[in-house]
Amino acid sequence: MNHTISVYVTNEAGVLSRIVGLFSGRGYNIESLTVAPTLDKAFSKVTIVTFGDSASIEQITKQLNRLIPVIKVMDLAINDAIESELAIIKVHAKDEDRAQILHVTQVTDSKIIDVTDKTYVIRAVGDDKHISALVELLKPFGIKDLVRSGKVAMSKNA
């Protein structure tokens, strides 16, 4: 099962390496990873998406809590979290397709952020299903490049 783990850490060199090392050393895969400082620049929030059963996730959270720079670890249950990701997608934009691509961006609440004579670059923000649906809608036009940020999440209650 897919789990999103939020880790609040001190913002210091080597913290990310220790967290990733914990996962790789125990054979756990990281599906998505985002890191950014919090309002207090002395701390960062690490959002990790991984797969595992409840026992595996409990073991991961206990091991993360043992790391010195870790302040707090939370397994964000899907009903307890607000989640989002960013995607930037470059698509071929032939003259005859431009109106259709514009329509796709409007109905998916995404935005064209760059235009050339041959391409559109589109920015989308949403959950995994929203981004994946947009990608499927844009495939017929020809996707030249795609980058996704990975999930960011926060608890609704904590």
Image (cartoon, rainbow, N blue to C red):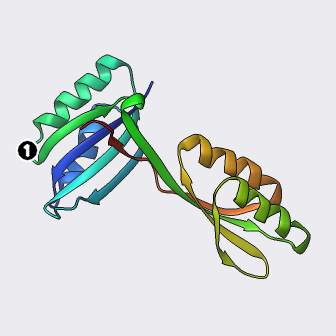
Judged from this view, the residue extending furthest toward the left is 68
Residue 10, position as x, y percentages in the image: 13, 54
Say which residue appears at 88% left-offset and 74% top-offset.
Answer: 95
Residue 97, position as x, y percentages in the image: 87, 66
Q: Secondary structure at mark 1?
A: loop
Say which residue appears at 80% left-offset and 70% top-offset.
Answer: 93
Judged from this view, the residue extending furthest toward the front is 157
Residue 38, position as x, y percentages in the image: 23, 58
Residue 31 visible in this rendered orientation of the protein: no
In screen coordinates, is 12 left or right of 149?
A: left
Judged from this view, the residue extending furthest toward the right is 96
Residue 113, position as x, y percentages in the image: 62, 73
Instruction: Categorize mark 1 by other alpha carbons within 10 Å: few (<14), some (14-19), many (20+).
Output: few
Kind of residue at disc 1: Ile
Q: Which residue is mark 1?
A: 68
In screen coordinates, is 63 left or right of 119?
A: left
Residue 91 appears in which quarter of the rendering?
Answer: bottom right
In screen coordinates, is 138 left or right of 100?
A: left
Towards the viewer: 118 or 98: 98
Say which residue appears at 45% left-offset and 24% top-offset.
Answer: 1
Say which residue appears at 12% left-offset and 41% top-offset.
Answer: 67
Vertical placement of residue 152 versus 51, above or below: below
Vertical placement of residue 141 versus 2, above or below: below
Towards the viewer: 32 or 23: 32
Residue 79 visible in this rendered orientation of the protein: yes
Judged from this view, the residue extending furthest toward the bottom is 117
Q: Quadrant of the C terminus?
A: top left
In screen coordinates, is 97 left or right of 78?
A: right
Residue 83 appears in which quarter of the rendering?
Answer: top left
Q: How many marks?
A: 1
